[in-house]
Image: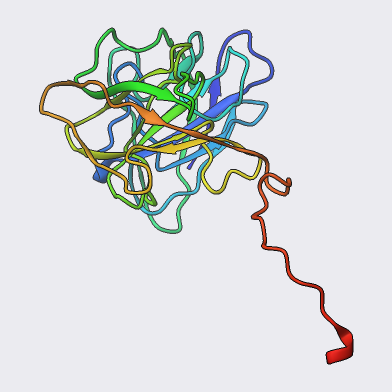
Amino acid sequence: MTGRIQVEGVETYRGVASVWDVAGGKVPDPRRYIVIPSAMAALEADGSFTLTVAPGTYYLGAIVRFTPGPPLGPPRLGDRVFLSPDGAGEYFKVEVRGGETVDVGTRSGGWEYEGFAPEADHGIRGIVRDTAGEPVADLLVFGFADPSMSLQPVGVSDRTDAQGLYLLRLDRPQPVFLRVRESYGGGPLMGGGYVGVYGGAEPRAVRVPEEGIVEGIDIEVIHLPPAGTEERRPSRPEQPPVDLGKQ
């Protein structure tokens, strides 16, 4: 799937194009919740993009960054949102067949992202604290449908505030398992950072009702030093010296 985003007055583009599988039931709407896309790719400097996806029908959306920070991830206040949803709440769908490339052409317009609606239809709220009980700011809480938390997340919160408060907004009521990280990337935290799971060593599901917010779901995080440091390496018991005369 290829295309190009065009904004009057922008010469060098920063941003991301994303798709959400229609069959998977994920309907993007960053004003109400954040759902992880099926695929994403950073925009090229001229606003063009290329996405490789399996055959299927997808919602297509894009963000042009007018804010500092990484190009990937959900919109930030002041960014421009395109295609899905548009300013009227409509969605742009693209059908992709095997072995074909779909060119959606050049798309202009878009609307300025002003943040979440005041309340969420479904969600989980709580505080993220470290092992000393102090709140930790600027972390993300991811929700997963599986207890191993190995599949794609069903949702992600906005970043925790100075009091460690988070709100994970969901597009539907469902049991979710919660994991805390600093960034959107998966895999081990080679660079160190905060990580935590609701329930600790035995992850606990949070059941979200048909309407409203589940309150008081606090999560403890630990801080991992960067991989390769002495703090990160496991300690080994000392071994007695070998007496070569007995060999």
Task: Name which residue lies at 45% across and 28% down.
Answer: 140
Q: Is residue 168 left or right of residue 76?
A: left
Tell me if residue 96 comes above or below residue 208 in the rendering: below
Tell me which corner region of the image, top left, top right, bottom left or bottom right, holds residue 118. top left
Tell me if residue 235 comes above or below residue 137 in the rendering: below
Looking at this rendering, what residue extends furthest in the bottom direction?
A: 247
Q: Position of residue 177 (x, y in %)?
A: 30, 41
Task: Name which residue lies at 37% across and 50% down.
Answer: 151
Task: Name which residue lies at 65% across and 39% down.
Answer: 225
Q: Is residue 220 left or right of residue 9?
A: left
Looking at this rendering, what residue extends furthest in the left direction?
A: 210
Quadrant location of the C terminus?
bottom right
- Looking at the image, how many numbered discs can be counted on the residues? 0
Task: Name which residue lies at 68% across and 47% down.
Answer: 227
Q: Position of residue 200 (x, y in %)?
A: 37, 42
**Residue nearest the viewer, comparing 196 with 233:** 233
Looking at this rendering, what residue extends furthest in the right direction?
A: 245
Q: Position of residue 22 (x, y in %)?
A: 27, 41
**Residue nearest the viewer, comparing 26 with 3:** 26
Tell me if residue 57 comes above or below residue 183 in the rendering: below
Q: Is residue 164 left or right of residue 192?
A: left
Q: Is residue 4 left or right of residue 233?
A: left
**Residue nearest the viewer, comparing 171 with 87:** 171
Q: Position of residue 20 (x, y in %)?
A: 36, 38
